[in-house]
Amino acid sequence: MGREIHIKAGGIELRAELNDTETAEAIWKALPFKAKASLWGEEIYFRIPVRRGLEAGRDEVEAGDLGYWPEGNAFCIFFGPTPASRGNEIRPASAVTVFGKVVGDAGGLRQVPSGALVSVERESGG
């Protein structure tokens, strides 16, 4: 992988690894950025300065996946079911490009309130 990012959301800090999609490359080049968190079920999302179409779009994701939602130019962090989910599945509002994954458990994000400041930057030394 080689491209690691550091995410701070409220009092929670996470590390994530980007995959080798073109979307991940575009996001890497745009870092760092800060935004206010919006919540949709167990998903945090926020607008970022990247505009891309859908790349290998997925209608269902896994806990810890990072997704880019083209309809909102949004960076999404999934950590559990959303209002669109059926059962325990994790379903975005519409298809997303999965561009990375949180290292470890993303469940701590349940503590992050809507409107909390989120910052994303390249991992030091990475």
Image (cartoon, grey):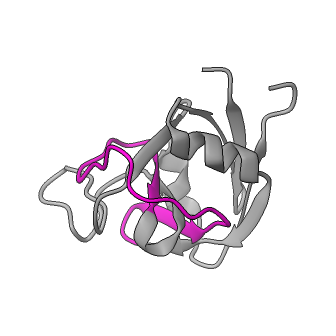
Seen as rendered, the residue at the extreme right is 125
Identify the magenta region: 40-69
Residue drawn at x 56%, y 61% is: 111
Q: Residue at x 56, y 30 (%)?
A: 103
Q: Can you say whether 3 is above or below 30 in the image?
A: above
Residue 105, given in percent of the width and then of the height, sits at: 50, 36
Image spot of residue 118 (x, y percent): 70, 63
Q: Is residue 79 above or below residue 36?
A: above
- Please indicate whether residue 119 sits to the left or right of residue 37 in the image: right
Up the image or down, 90 lies above or below 17; here it is below
The answer to whether 82 is drawn above or below residue 71 in the figure is above
Q: Identify the image quadrant of the N terminus.
A: top right
Q: Closer to the camera, 3 or 21?
A: 21
The x and y percentages for residue 104 are 53, 30
Q: State the residue at coordinates (19%, 61%).
A: 85
Query: What residue is shown at x 38% (from left), y 55% (from top)?
Result: 54
The reply, left or right, for residue 81 in relation to residue 99 is left
Depth order, front residue of 93/82: 93
Farthest residue in the top direction? 1
Residue 84 lies, in percent from the top left, at 21, 68
* Residue sitting nearer the eye, 86 or 21: 21
- Count numbered badges in the picture: 0
- Residue farthest to the bottom, as pictured: 115
Q: Quadrant of residue 2?
A: top right
- Residue 112 appears left or right of 106: right
Quarter of the image with the C terminus in it: top right
What secondary structure do most residues of the magenta stretch adopt? loop
Residue 96 part of the magenta-drawn span: no
